[in-house]
Image (cartoon, rainbow, N blue to C red):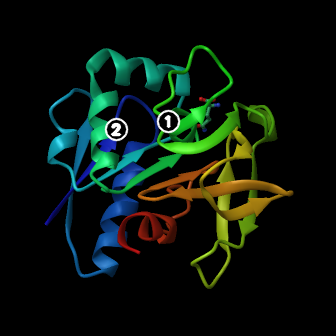
């Protein structure tokens, strides 16, 4: 059985857990999901997810608890990380916001809340590299990826990248855990 860590500082943890379990099952694997709020757990994990939420809060708690260095070590070992929405902001190389200490695991620059304010949240069907059918994506105060360095764009919306991959790290502007479709988790962890 795989050990799957979900950073549980805030955000939709149970939905990520369900998507991971479903993606694992599709590959004949089982996953035990553990919530990460303190150091010492990430080193036990085979795969990791950083959900949405508020990137300033997530980044502050990761640094305070020393989880930030553990996540960097996880990726340095080539183990997969899925970073969604606020998680993408935290994993990026530049959040264009002093209150976010980025982990520099995904070579993109992002602008927070740039797809619109809360009331402007929207949904879109995306063509994603590696998926045969479109993925129904939910954007909630989503970050815009405004520069892509050494990373591969897997999906775009309105001419902007919204899913990117950099080695073992997959980042999305949207929330792939909210629609009961685990194909993005599948791409991140099992493909
Ligand atoms: N607006 C949030 C931030 O900038 C991200 C939104 C989300 O994760 N749904 O941290």
Residue at x-position 27% and y-position 22%: 66
- Answer whether labels 2 and 1 touch (C-beta < 8 Å): yes
Instruction: Choose between 25 and 90: the one closer to the eye.
Output: 90
Farthest residue toward the right?
158
For this view, does 7 lie left or right of residue 167? left
Residue at x-position 55% and y-position 21%: 100
Farthest residue toward the bottom?
132
* Residue 153 quadrant: bottom right
Farthest residue toward the front?
150
* Residue picked out by circle 2: 72
Q: Is residue 53 above or below residue 34?
A: above
Q: Residues within 10 Å of mark 2 (few under 14, many from 20)?
A: some
* Residue picked out by circle 1: 104
Residue at x-position 30% and y-position 65%: 21
Residue 137: give x, y in percent of width and height. 66, 60
Residue 181: give x, y in percent of width and height. 51, 69
Instruction: Choose between 12 and 115: the one closer to the eye.
Output: 115
For this view, does 63 lie left or right of residue 154? left
Dot 1: element: loop
């Amino acid at each position: 059985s795989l050990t799957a860590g979900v950073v549980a500082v805030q955000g939709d943890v149970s939905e990520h857990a369900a998507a991971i379990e479903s993606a694992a099952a599709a590959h004949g694997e089982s996953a035990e999901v553990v919530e990460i709020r303190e150091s010492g757990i990430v080193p036990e994990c085979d795969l990791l997810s950083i959900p949405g939420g508020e990137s300033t809060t997530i980044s502050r708690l990761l640094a305070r608890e020393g989880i930030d260095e553990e996540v960097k070590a996880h990726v340095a070992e080539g183990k997969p990380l899925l970073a969604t929405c606020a998680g993408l902001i935290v994993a990026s190389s530049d959040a264009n916001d002093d209150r976010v200490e980025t982990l520099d695991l995904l070579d993109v620059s992002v602008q927070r809340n740039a797809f619109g304010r809360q009331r402007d949240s929207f949904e879109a069907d995306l063509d994603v590299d590696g998926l045969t059918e479109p993925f129904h994506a939910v954007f909630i105060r989503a970050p815009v990826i405004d520069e892509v360095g050494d990373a591969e764009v897997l999906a775009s919306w309105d001419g902007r990248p919204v899913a990117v991959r950099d080695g073992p790290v997959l980042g999305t502007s949207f929330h792939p855990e909210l629609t009961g479709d685990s194909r993005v988790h599948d791409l991140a962890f099992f493909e």
